[in-house]
């Protein structure tokens, strides 16, 4: 992720952790002129906010597997 994407994620995550719902976060971001990565508004349903949180979590899970060191399995032949 770029630094801008990480800042956007951290803001969304902090608002979510404080108890704001996806729709309220969308309104908050739109009111402050913070746009999505594509340069559009966040919508009214909160789907974009949900996607940002979900994709970041999925990415972290994938990176755990990529960084993990596996022991080779050798046959007894």
Image: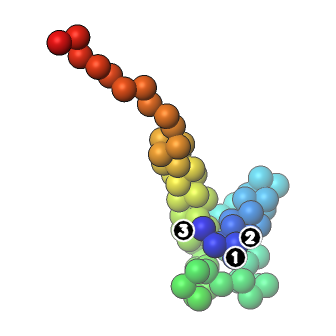
**Picture coordinates of residue 38 (x, y %)?**
54, 85
Label 1 secondary element = helix
Residue 25 vertical placement versus 56 (above, below): below
* Callout 3 touching callout 1 (CB < 8 Å): no
Location of residue 42 by image quarter: bottom right
Give the secondary structure at mark 3. Answer: helix
For label 2, the crowd category at 10 Å Cα-Cα, with few meaning under 14, some 14 to 19 and many 20 or more, is few
Which of 25/77 is in front?
77
Residue 21 position within the rendered picture, expressed as x and y whole percent measured from the top left: 70, 60
Seen at 37% across and 26% down, the residue is 72
Residue under pointer 3: 47
Q: Residues within 10 Å of mark 3 (few under 14, many from 20)?
A: few
* Mark 3 or 1, nearer chain start: 1
Q: Is residue 49 above or below residue 18?
A: below
- Does the rendering let one see residue 1? yes
* Residue 54, numbered label: none
- In the rendered image, the quadrant that contains the N terminus is bottom right
Q: Residues within 10 Å of mark 1 (few under 14, many from 20)?
A: few
User: Marks 1 and 2, how far apart in space?
Assistant: 5 Å
| Lower position in the chain sequence, tag 2 or tag 3 | 2
Question: Residue at the location (77% across, 53% down)?
Answer: 17
Name the residue tied to disc 1.
4
Residue at the far top in the pictured view: 76
Res 54 seen here: no
Residue nearest the viewer, comparing 73 with 53: 73
Q: Which mark is residue 7?
A: 2
Q: Position of residue 34 (x, y in %)?
A: 72, 83
Q: Are marks 1 and 2 in contact (CB under 8 Å)?
A: yes
The residue positioned 56% from the left and 71% from the top of the image is: 48
């Amino acid at each position: 992720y770029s630094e801008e994407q990480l800042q956007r994620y951290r803001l969304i995550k902090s608002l979510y952790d404080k108890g704001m719902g996806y729709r309220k976060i969308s309104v908050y971001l739109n009111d402050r002129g913070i746009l999505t990565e594509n340069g559009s508004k966040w919508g009214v349903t909160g789907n974009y906010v949900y996607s940002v949180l979900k994709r970041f979590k999925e990415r972290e899970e994938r990176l755990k597997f990529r960084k993990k060191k596996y022991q080779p399995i050798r046959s007894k032949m």
